[in-house]
Image (cartoon, helix red, strand yellow):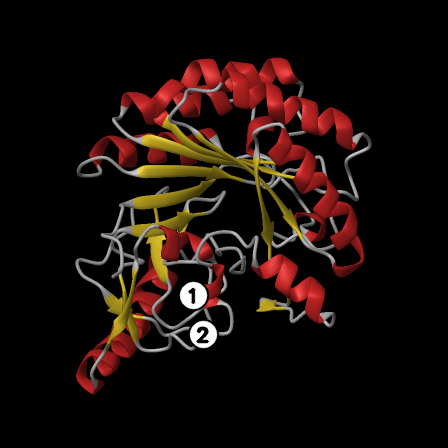
Amino acid sequence: MSKAPEPSLEWEITTQCNYHCDYCCAKTRMIVTNRHGSDETIAAMFKLLNELPGQWSVKLIGGEPLIHPRFFEIVQHTIDAGHTLVITTNFSLPLKRIRQLAETAGDKLTVLTASLHLTEVKDVDEFIAKAAEFNRVKHPSTVFLVTSVCLEEKFGELKGIAEKLEAAGVRFAFQALKVDGKFVKYSNAEIEQGIVDKFVENTDKIRGADLYGTLCHTGELFFRVNVDGQVVRCYNSQPLYNLGNVTDGTFRRFTEAKPCLAARCTCTVPANRGMILYTQKANPVQMALAQGEGLVRRVQNKLASSEKQPLDPVES
């Protein structure tokens, strides 16, 4: 039985990152001009957070979100607006900054995911020690998880690191490698099974699954806001995708679950938040209406934002 949907949004507050991983799903190393979210976009998002009905889970992403100069102001406003926080970080900042986050957010920080990148981390033992310390000082209700994209040649090393982290009381999970928006099938059967056993929650439900036409609450109870304020339904480009822009006032949420029109689903967040109605397929009328609505929205957004071209969709 699927879990009830948890209203959620992801806000890309910056495309800047102090790491340059070759496999980066956000492709930050390929962006010509990395930048922080502007004051105008932040003001528009603050207004939206104040207006959203009920409590939403707000995930701050990047780039590396903690390097945004207004990061802690964004955290505080999100909390003051009555929402909870989820944060994904490469965990590279000094422990003092990480402790500050735990103190500022308290129990409103529901999840913190620290991404371990072996190509960038110089001292793995230091990373493990920092993770153990954050695990000690965080609020008891905060779920803390270290994840790492599993490169086949790094599996043995990552397995050893996972054992050390878990010995220190810190949870670890593998993120499945994706290339060009597609999940990679590992060539070594032993590695494949070892990774599957420690996958991020719900990866098994979307990896290789055909969800085209499945009803989904993304666009209604989940959406993504990029650094320019452009809002999209989820991570996978499709006809029913662009939802407008918070900065210029054209953003409009769906009012009900809509069929997925993407060729594949590559992000676990909608699955983790209960957005996907796996057993409910749209009928032909619903599919036709969704295709038509997607076309209308695309034209309306293009007309309304003719001076502001949105970034290419990013898959994760």
Quarter of the image with the C terminus in it: bottom right
Q: Position of residue 87 (x, y in %)?
A: 48, 34
Q: Amino acid at mark 1?
A: Lys
Tag shown at residue 80: none
Q: Position of residue 27 (x, y in %)?
A: 65, 53
Mark 1: which secondary structure? Answer: helix
Q: Amino acid at mark 2?
A: Ala
Q: Which residue is mark 1?
A: 205
Q: Which residue is mark 2?
A: 209
Residue at the far bottom in the pictured view: 284
Residue at image position (37%, 41%) is 247
Residue 83's quadrant in the figure?
top left
User: Of residues 137 and 85, which is closer to you in this image?
Assistant: 137
Residue at image position (23%, 78%) is 282
Quarter of the image with the N terminus in it: bottom left
User: Of residues 109 and 129, which is closer to you in this image?
Assistant: 129
Residue 238 is left or right of residue 173, and the answer is left
Using the numbered discs, state the Cα–Cα distance from disc 2 to disc 1 in whole angstroms: 7 Å
Mark 2 near mark 1, Cβ–Cβ under 8 Å?
yes
